[in-house]
C-alpha cells in the first residue's frame, strides 16, 4: 500500500535518548530495518550480554523477526494505537511521518477513511462509495454538532462551516489527481444545500 511506500528517511530523526539496552521485552517500538522506511514492531527478546535485540514486525500479513545489533535499527518508543488508530492525529504521542502514515493505514484498513489533524480533515479515497455514510440521516446526525463531537466526517466540516455563517466561510479541498476531491466537494455541497 501507498502508506508503506512513503519515503520516511527524511523524517527519521532520533528523539529518544534511551540506550539500546534500556529496552524490555514487550516494548512497542519504531525501528528502521533498512528497507526504506521505519516499521512498527514489538521487542521479543533483549540479550544484554550480546547487545542484541530481537524485534518482531508484521510485513504483508506475516510476522517477521529482525535481529538488531549495536547501532542498528534506530529504535524509538511507539504508542499503542489499538486496532483502529486515533481519530485525531494531534493525539499521537510519537509525532513523525511514520506514525502519521501508520495511523491512517490502521484507520483505512478498518473502513475509517476520515481522520482529523486538529481542525483539518484527512480523507483517504476508498475508490468506492461507503454504504450509509452520506445520506440524509448522516447529514442530520452531524447537523449543529461542533467539530470533534462525532467521528471525523466530511459532514462535520460542512457543519462547522454552516455554524460559522453569516461570516464568510471557505472549505478547502485539496489533493492529488484521483484522491477524491470532486466527490468530496459534491458531498460538502450536498450537506450545505
Image (tube, rainbow, N blue to C red):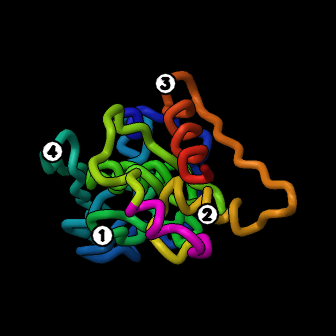
- What percent of the width, then of the height, locates residue 77? 44, 68
- Secondary structure beneath disc 3? loop
Is residue 144 visible in the rendered image? The answer is yes
Q: How far apart are marks 3 and 2 (CA)?
A: 25 Å
Residue receiving disc 3: 178
- Looking at the picture, tell me which residue is in the foreground, 187 or 35: 187
Residue receiving disc 1: 82
- The image quarter containing residue 126 is top left
- Secondary structure beneath disc 4? loop
**Disc 2 residue crowd, few under 14, some 14–19, many 20+, Cα 10 Å:** many
- What percent of the width, then of the height, locates residue 121? 57, 54
**Disc 3 residue crowd, few under 14, some 14–19, many 20+, Cα 10 Å:** few
- Give the position of the N terminus as an image quadrant: top left
- The answer to whether the residue labelled 2 contacts the one labelled 4, judged by CB atoms less than 8 Å apart, is no
In the picture as drawn, the residue positioned furthest to the top comes out as 177
- Secondary structure beneath disc 2? helix
- Secondary structure beneath disc 1? loop
- The answer to whether the residue labelled 1 contacts the one labelled 3, judged by CB atoms less than 8 Å apart, is no
Mark carried by residue 61: 4
Which of marks 3 and 4 precedes in the sequence? 4
**Disc 1 residue crowd, few under 14, some 14–19, many 20+, Cα 10 Å:** few
Which of marks 4 and 2 precedes in the sequence? 4
Amino acid at each position: 500500500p501507498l502508506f508503506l511506500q512513503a519515503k520516511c528517511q527524511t523524517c527519521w530523526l532520533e528523539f529518544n535518548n534511551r540506550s539500546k539496552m534500556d529496552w524490555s521485552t514487550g516494548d512497542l517500538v519504531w525501528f528502521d530495518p533498512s528497507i526504506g522506511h521505519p516499521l512498527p514492531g514489538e521487542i521479543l527478546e533483549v540479550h544484554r550480554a550480546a547487545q542484541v535485540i530481537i524485534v518482531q514486525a508484521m510485513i504483508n500479513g506475516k510476522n517477521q523477526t529482525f535481529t538488531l545489533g549495536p547501532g542498528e535499527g534506530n529504535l524509538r518508543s511507539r504508542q499503542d494505537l489499538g486496532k483502529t488508530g486515533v481519530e485525531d492525529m494531534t493525539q499521537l504521542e510519537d509525532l513523525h511521518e511514520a506514525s502519521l502514515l501508520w495511523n491512517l493505514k490502521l484507520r483505512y484498513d478498518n473502513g475509517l477513511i476520515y481522520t482529523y489533524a486538529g481542525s483539518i480533515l484527512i480523507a483517504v479515497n476508498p475508490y468506492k462509495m461507503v454504504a450509509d455514510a452520506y445520506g440524509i440521516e448522516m447529514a442530520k446526525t452531524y447537523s449543529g454538532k461542533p467539530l470533534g463531537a462525532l467521528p471525523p466526517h466530511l459532514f462535520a466540516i460542512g457543519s462547522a462551516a454552516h455554524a460559522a455563517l453569516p461570516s464568510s466561510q471557505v472549505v478547502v479541498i485539496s489533493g492529488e489527481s484521483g484522491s477524491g476531491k470532486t466527490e468530496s466537494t459534491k458531498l460538502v455541497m450536498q450537506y450545505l444545500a
